[in-house]
Image (cartoon, grey):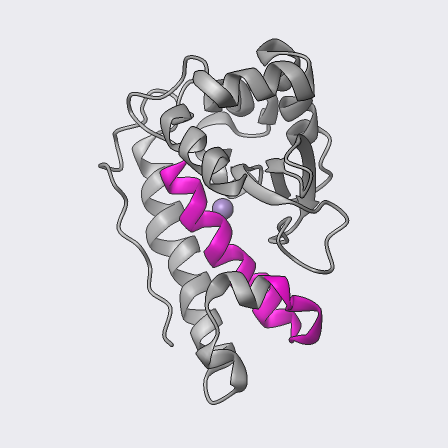
Amino acid sequence: MSHQLPNLPYDYAALEPHIDARTMEIHHSKHHNAYVTNLNNAIAGTEMENMDIVSLCQNIGKFPMAVRNNGGGHYNHSMFWTSMSANGGGTPQGKLAEAIENDLGGFEKFKELFAAAGTTRFGSGWAWLCVQATGKLSVCSTPNQDNPLMDISECKGTPILGMDVWEHAYYLNYQNRRPEYIAAFFNVINWAEISLRYEAAL
Ligand code: MN3
């Protein structure tokens, strides 16, 4: 199957002032678009062409590095766009809020752990909130375009929230100030969507 760049569910300017329109436009129309193009080129004419993106990630250790990098890039960004909303921010509600309390020590502790996962990731990568096979929540990070679905990842689970900490996600507006971008990211998290993913993952 051929993978496609998803449309954003909002305008490029929707997340301002937290994430600026120019960053969103380049990130989506150039960076994510390139991952999709390069993924399609890498799987053309192979067994991988008939696999969905989750199955590709789950078996990525068997596949070429181009598929790991671009397939991960496609999965991660597709999830990233829908993890954010112009009406985002605030705090999670319901079962997810209870799980954050029970498994991570509360929302403020979650923010500390998640921000630290993003801040301390050397170079490029992602911070993740995952559901473990036991149903418990965990926070971790991965390098490059790896993700917790990947069989080769040290950080495993079902990802329900990912934060891109590549410089291309923030450099135009925040330059080298990754911690400021991370602080702003909390203002756009679409907790209603993350809750749905949490309940689906259980
Ligand atoms: Mn990115």
Closer to the camera in the image, 16 or 150 = 150
Asked which quadrant contains residue 158, the reply is top right
**Residue at horizontal 60%, vertical 53%?**
145
* Left or right of 76 on screen, residue 4: left
Residue 112 appearing in the image:
no
Residue 18 image position (x, y, % from top left): 39, 22
Q: Quadrant of the N terminus?
A: bottom left
Is 195 on the left or on the right of 155, as rendered?
left
Is 111 situated above or below 142?
above
Q: Does 68 appear above or below 184?
A: below
The extreme right residue here reads 154
Total labels: the figure holds 0
List x then y, in percent, for residue 51: 48, 74
Q: Position of residue 101 (x, y in %)?
A: 62, 14
Quarter of the figure with the C terminus: top right
Q: Would you say the magenta stretch is mainly helix, strand or loop?
A: helix
The x and y percentages for residue 193 are: 38, 32
Q: Which residues are magenta?
A: 58-83
Confirm whether the magenta stretch covers residue 76. yes
Please say whether residue 4 is one of the residues in the magenta stretch.
Answer: no
Relative to residue 27, is residue 54 depicted above or below?
A: below
* Residue displayed at 48% across by 38% down: 169
Residue placed furthest toward the bottom: 45
Question: For this rendering, which residue is in front, 156 or 123?
Answer: 156
Residue positioned 61% across, 10% down in the render: 108
The answer to whether residue 80 of the structure is visible from this angle is yes
Is 165 placed left or right of 174 in the picture? right
